[in-house]
Amino acid sequence: MKTMDKETLIAQLKEIVKPYAKDQDALQNINEHTDFVKDLKINSANLVDVILDVEEQFNIVIDNEAMEHMLNVKSAMEIIEAKLGGQ
Amino acid sequence: MTVQAILDKLPFTTPFLFVDGLDHIDSDKVKGHFTFREELDFYKGHFKGYPVTPGVILTEVTAQIGLVCLGIYLMGEEELGAHMSFGLTSTEMEFMRPVFPGEKVTVEGEKVYFRFGKLKCRVTMKNEAQEEVCSGVIAGMIITKAHE
């Protein structure tokens, strides 16, 4: 599979985190370096929902190890692309 | 895991234990009951001269039966670390009918998911007439204890 366009992927992630992000300014300015917890102020319980929504949206399965790394937009993009590329 | 083993593992006691017994449990769903005794303390103040079970207590009953009991069953024999515990993370409830002192309620909990240490359940409470009292979605997860 061709690597997904970065901007498209960030836009898709933005839609996914929208219901859980407490910091609306950080959400509007979401970029590769945005941290889910520190910037968007998503709590650990809602982070699980973010990951399950990512699984559903991209039709991938995220294991415990990948989950522990999925703390910011950059690592989320890397994990999604690796999972999609591996199919 | 037997029902008695689950009840023994519940981290609650009087005056905040709201599970009398379980009628069914498997890895997807649980059913249990509780009777609101007339002498329960909160009836003295909710409301003045007109005792009605507070919604927050109804929510607690659905959480103890529908979430905590199922969580204990799903964890099975796996022991939590010394500094780990379960914490309530969200409740989204709707209330349809009042519950008065002396009423027996039945709670059914159905697992939405149990992933990455978080359990989310759809819960429904019914009265003895099988009318829906309240329902919603409740979640909790394994957390590090804040104190100790």
Image (cartoon, rainbow, N blue to C red):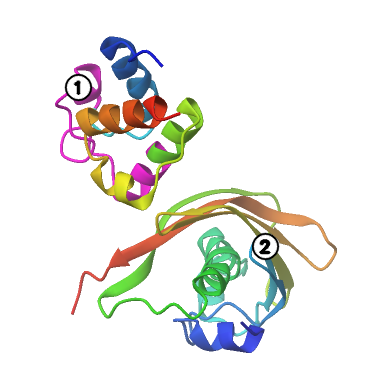
Q: The residue under label 2 is which amino acid type?
A: Lys
Q: Nearer the viewer, residue A36 or B132?
A: A36
Q: Position of residue B108 (x, y in %)?
A: 69, 62
Rendered view: B55 above or below A34 = below
The answer to which quarter of the image holds residue B67 is bottom right
Rendered view: B102 above or below B126 = below
Indicate yes or no whether the magenta region holds residue A46.
yes
User: Residue at the location (81% across, 68% down)?
Assistant: B128
User: Residue at the location (46% across, 34% down)?
Assistant: A60
Q: Nearer the viewer, residue A7 or B52?
A: A7
- Residue occupied by mark 1: A25
Real-space Cα distance between discs 1 and 2?
A: 40 Å
Q: Position of residue B31 (x, y in %)?
A: 71, 69
Rendered view: B64 above or below A73 = below
Numbered disc 1: secondary structure: helix
Q: Position of residue A45 (x, y in %)?
A: 36, 50
Q: Quadrant of the C terminus of chain A?
A: top left
Q: The residue under label 1 is which amino acid type?
A: Asp
For the magenta stretch, what is the residue range?
A24-50
- Residue occupied by mark 2: B29
The answer to which quarter of the image holds residue A9 is top left
Rendered view: A62 above or below A27 = below
Chain under numbered label 2: B
Q: Position of residue A22 (x, y in %)?
A: 27, 34
The mark lying in front, picked from 1 and 2, is 2
Proximity of marks 1 and 2: CB atoms separated by less than 8 Å: no
Q: Nearer the viewer, residue A6 or A10?
A: A6
